[in-house]
Amino acid sequence: MKRCIIIGGAGISDYQRTGSYIKDGDYVIYCDSGLKHLSGLRAGPSLIVGDFDSHENPRLQTETIVLPTEKDDTDTYYAVKEAIRRGFDDFLLLGVSGGRLDHTLGNVSILLYLDSIGKSGLLIDDHSEMEIVSSSPKEIKSDFSFFSLINITGTARGVTVENAKYPLKDAEITCEYQYGISNEVLPGMVSRVSVAEGKLLLIRVF
């Protein structure tokens, strides 16, 4: 199954690391000011989406969807929905966090949306990888400096963390008390996180 990459306009300082996530055959959508990363990421666009209020329409031969400036969906959210309509199930989000907090939180919520409809989503920024832990366990390798579990919806119950400096067994994490921050994988091991009920945002810190 081909993967869809959504590229937004938030800052990317390490193009080499971020670009290493892009593979041959990926379907790449640039969203409006995400086009500023075109040369840095060296990934040609499969589709361009935007209202072009923050970047000039490059008018390339690539298929381009021009959106109205007044709309409910952000350019990034529209791009995700369009990719779903085109049959994609696996998503990588780049350049969508950092800078304006409202945009960052809105884009992190895309991970919740994808998870809620059975799609896979991974968000990469200059500091970390982010994805949702819900019905399926997630792993964290020891080459990450830290990892955190953040509750961004409801209450997560039956939280279990294995092979970590701060293990958990059948724990509960609420939005009001975020104590799952800055955990560490035990040397030479792979940590495993699972949730029996609810969802958590897993952040693997480089």
Image (cartoon, rainbow, N blue to C red):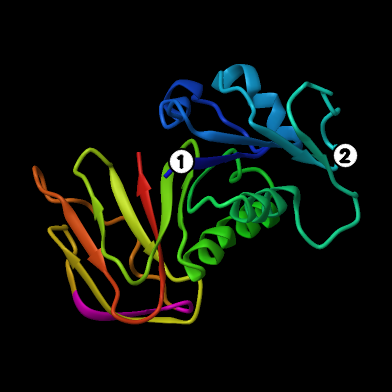
Image quadrant containing the N terminus: top left
Q: Amino acid at mark 1?
A: Lys
Where residue 128 sits, quadrant-wise, is top left
Where residue 188 sits, quadrant-wise, is top left
- Packing grade of label 1 (10 A; few <14, some 14-19, many >=20) is few
Q: Mark 1 = which residue?
A: 2
Relative to residue 49, is residue 12 drawn left or right?
left
Residue 65 locus on image (x, y percent): 80, 41
Q: Is residue 175 magenta?
A: yes
**Helix, strand or loop at mark 2:** loop
Extreme residue toward the left, this view: 188
Q: Mark 2 = which residue?
A: 53
Q: Considering only order in the chain, which callout, 2 or 1, is on the residue closer to the N terminus? A: 1
Q: Amino acid at mark 2?
A: Asp
Task: Say which residue appears at 75% left-offset and 53% top-offset.
Answer: 74
**Residue nearer the viewer, 128 or 123:** 123
- The segment highlighted magenta reads 169-176
**Helix, strand or loop at mark 1:** loop
Relative to residue 12, is residue 59 drawn left or right?
right
